[in-house]
Image: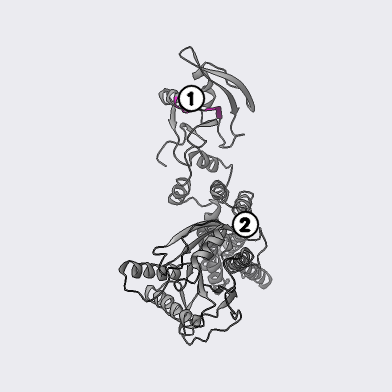
Amino acid sequence: MSNNANDTIYAVATPPGRSAIAVIRISGGNAAKIPALFSVPCPAAGQFNVSRLMLAGKILDQVILLFMQGPHSSTGEDVCEIHCHGSRAVIDAIIAHLERASGLRLAAPGEFTQRSFLNGKMDLSGVEGLADLIDAQTPAQLNQAWAQIDGALRAPVMAWRAELIEIVARLEALIDFSDEDLPFAIEQNLRDGTKSLITSLAENLSDGGVGELVRDGVVVALVGPANAGKSTVLNGLAGRAAAIVSDEAGTTRDIIRIELDLFGVPTTILDTAGIRNTSGRIEIEGIKRSITAAANADLIVVILDGSDNNWPEACAKIDDAINSEIRQSQTNQKIVSGKIINTRPRLYVLNKADLGTVRANYQIEHKDKYSDTYDMLAISAKKQTDIYVLSTALAERLVPLNHAEGSVIITRQRHRRSIQAAHDALGRALIHDFQKAPELAAEDFRFAAGALGRITGEIDVEELLSSIFSAFCIGK
């Protein structure tokens, strides 16, 4: 941020609009002088006063004034807070008076939290946890955010980094005394310690991306032939009539989105246009969008009419269309033994179980080499008990169940990239001869330590800091 870090800053810390209480926060060297602007004394450090703010000899508002003296405050600076009534007139009058005062300026987005970070009140992973706490919509997101704030990531990262720095120090000593051989026991100890670190990093990297799923949410695409019951399934999951349900084919022309909490994971469900042969240009465009949405979803759910004996053929047609889209876009693929394998999980749902006999465990005969092994489920979308079974099946496929709550420490791609970089650098370090080329090994260890340091902010990257703090609201 271009503003001077020594400025005294102010901002409204509560949401805009009419409310019972609003909080105006001031931080910086002039914070203790703010009450005097309204003809009232500043409370003692760590205390609060109930005071009537005065402007031009008239009562502006009766407020609670709090004062916290740095470094014993949230920002590490002197902080004054005005807890006033939340009327627009009161807030505007207080802010206008602060604007006219010398030595004050409006805070930039996230600047209070940035000062907290710069003054050592929290590390960068804690800052990100605070941002996640503010944005949390589900209990799982809330718990994960507090875990980050309390050091779920910071503690192991700091321990790993401390070990790396110790190894680097030993290698640096070897460089300084290069005419002496490194005892075998010491070298073996360094290598064993490095291997242990690599294993620990690898274990955390192989978490299935659960932390990112909980934080960022997932997308589930409902695709299938016309009149298979996709919109009925959507309404069942939403618990309301989110989509129009009709016996007329082609009722859903465009993608309908709903947001829901799927066992703690914020989930976007997409109801797409029914896939069928049609000459209508609008419907054709809707079908194209359906296929594209499915190819980019975190989970593809194909809804089939289980009472129709031709559902296997409909299934194969949809599968071919999705796989073709994936191949053309070159996304969501990996190469295994020279073959392209779709990495998106799929669930096949045989709907309308109430209308006829369906074979829930039917194995789809499919020769397309791009296909996965399909999981199948038979339900009636009109039964809430079956919708619950479907919800559970979705949750099981979206979030790996082998990770207990609180065991996942990686919640952002930034964390994952840094830990992966450290892991790879340690692997390179072990290739070097510690006797003949200790400086090369030491450089890889330093790189690994730097990668981990970026997670907590031990390594200062101005561009990274600006990106993180600018995402906060003003007043935080």
Image spot of residue 449 (x, y percent): 55, 59
Q: Residue at x 31, y 73 (%)?
A: 279
Q: Position of residue 442 (x, y in %)?
A: 54, 64
Residue on which the image places disc 1: 90
**Residue at the far top in the pictured view:** 57
Within 10 Å of disc 1 (Cα), the crowding (few <14, some 14-19, many 20+) is: some
Residue 419: percent from left, percent from top: 55, 62
* Residue at the spot 62% in from the left edge and 26% down from the top edge: 45
Q: Label 1's element?
A: helix
C-alpha gap between disc 1 and disc 2? 51 Å
Query: Is residue 88 rendered magenta in the image?
Result: yes
Task: Provide the secondary structure element on which disc 2 rests.
Answer: helix
Q: In the rendering, at what x and y percent does residue 437 appear?
A: 53, 70
Dot 1 and dot 2 residues touching (CB under 8 Å): no
Q: Nearer the viewer, residue 278 or 60?
A: 278
Of tags 1 and 2, which is closer to the observer?
Answer: 1
Q: How is the image coloured?
A: one colour
Q: Nearest the camera: 75 or 442? A: 75
- Can you see residue 446? no
The magenta-colored residue range is: 79-92
For label 2, count other residues whose C-alpha is less than 10 Å away and answer few (under 14), some (14-19) or many (20+).
few
Placement of the N terminus among the 4 image quadrants: top left
Between 69 and 19, the residue placed more toward the observer is 19
Q: Which residue is mark 2?
A: 162
Q: Is residue 135 visible?
A: yes
Q: Earlier in the sequence, mark 1 or mark 2?
A: 1
- Type of amino acid under label 1: Val
**Residue 407 is a magenta residue:** no
Against 455, residue 99 (above or below) is above
Q: Amino acid at mark 2?
A: Ala
Tell me the quarter of the picture where residue 452 sits. Answer: bottom right
In which image quadrant can residue 374 be found? bottom right
